[in-house]
Image: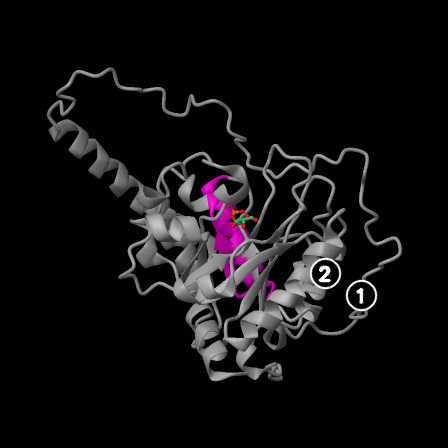
Amino acid sequence: MDWGLKNRLSSIIKPHNNRALMLAVDHGYFLGPTERLENPKKVIAPLLKHCDSLMLTRGVQRTSVPAETDTPMVLRVSGGSSIIGDDLSQEDITVSIQDAIRLNASALAMSIFVGSKYEYQTVVNLGKLVSEAEQYGIPVLAVTAVGKELGKDARYLSLACRMAAEQGAHIVKTYYCENFEKVVESCPVPIIVAGGKKIPERDALQLTYNAVKAGAVGVDMGRNIWQSDHPVAMIKATRAIIHQNANVDQAFKMYKQLAAQDSNKKQKSKGKKPNQNKSNKPQNKSKGKKPNQNKSNKPQNKSKGKKPNQNKSNKPQNKSKGKKPNQNKSNKPQNKPEPKNN
Ligand code: R5P
């Protein structure tokens, strides 16, 4: 592995414990102003110092992140379809490698849609992106997208993750599922887990704990952090699991304490603040009563009736029956055979 690539990777997955806490704020690339991420600058500011890396688009990076930050940027370079369009899987590469370098990206991220109408296009794009990025020593994170009609079980996710790794992805981001060890075991590169739609804080911490226990390097979490009423408390608690080996009870206790402090602080500052609304402009107090902007943010695959053939002919072969899961193997980028640079 080239020095630059190794160096960038180690800024994302910390070499001392092989763990990573990535904060995802790239949702607007197909969801627009996602609930509680309407103003990315405000959302990112208090969280930036608590994550190991930030996953975002170039538009948000340029407009909403101070260039003085030393947090590594994981730049999403794919897109093209929206939540209201015909088919979310129709993505292409939308950012040039030159622009990614100008933005000092520590890694590039793109989605593949295995089992969808645009499977071929997105998988080939991944291969091409890896070839290009490796010329400059930039790692690629492949996101295995899931949709209504794509599976979310270990069989499907193993297929998608393995395909991403085979195309040369250096990290694979996927979803947690039952028997997640099997997904990790059959993927030769580090796996990081997405948080998914907002669930109660304790459940999100449990998901983080389970994912790491099953061999993931960490989480690339978005909604379960910034859609929480107490985002800083939540990211700190998540961090405690990933980097301090806290268990779920310890992390949730931490969350509750920090959340209580946060509420008190907000309450105090509310009480102290004189009416700053000098202009007497009517204030929009209908927080949370916004038009329903895809509350769950679940990407909906609109190609009704076109259920992709999951695993019929592409049977992912789980040959690991009876084999002890070697969790360290899959999660140690530094010990892996070095990919050749083109
Ligand atoms: C999805 O494709 C986006 O890349 C998000 O970054 C990803 O879903 C992680 O965010 P969340 O934890 O909200 O699922």
Closer to us: 108 or 80: 80
Mark 1: give few (<14), some (14-19) or many (20+) Cα within 10 Å.
some
Range drawn in magenta = 199-223
Q: Amino acid at mark 1?
A: Asn
Give the labeled residue for mark 2: 158
Give the labeled residue for mark 1: 318
Q: Is residue 224 above or below residue 276?
A: below
Total number of numbered discs in the rendering: 2
Residue 221 - label: none
Image quarter hosting the N terminus: bottom right
Residue 14 image position (x, y, % from top left): 43, 72
**Element under disc 1:** loop
Q: Residue at x 50, y 75 (%)?
A: 136
Residue 38 makes an appearance in the image: yes
Mark 1 or mark 2, which is nearer to you? 2
Res. 290 image quadrant: top left
Q: Let me know if residue 102 is in the magenta part.
A: no
Residue 283 image position (x, y, % from top left): 26, 19
Res. 280 image quadrant: top left
Closer to us: 277 or 20: 277
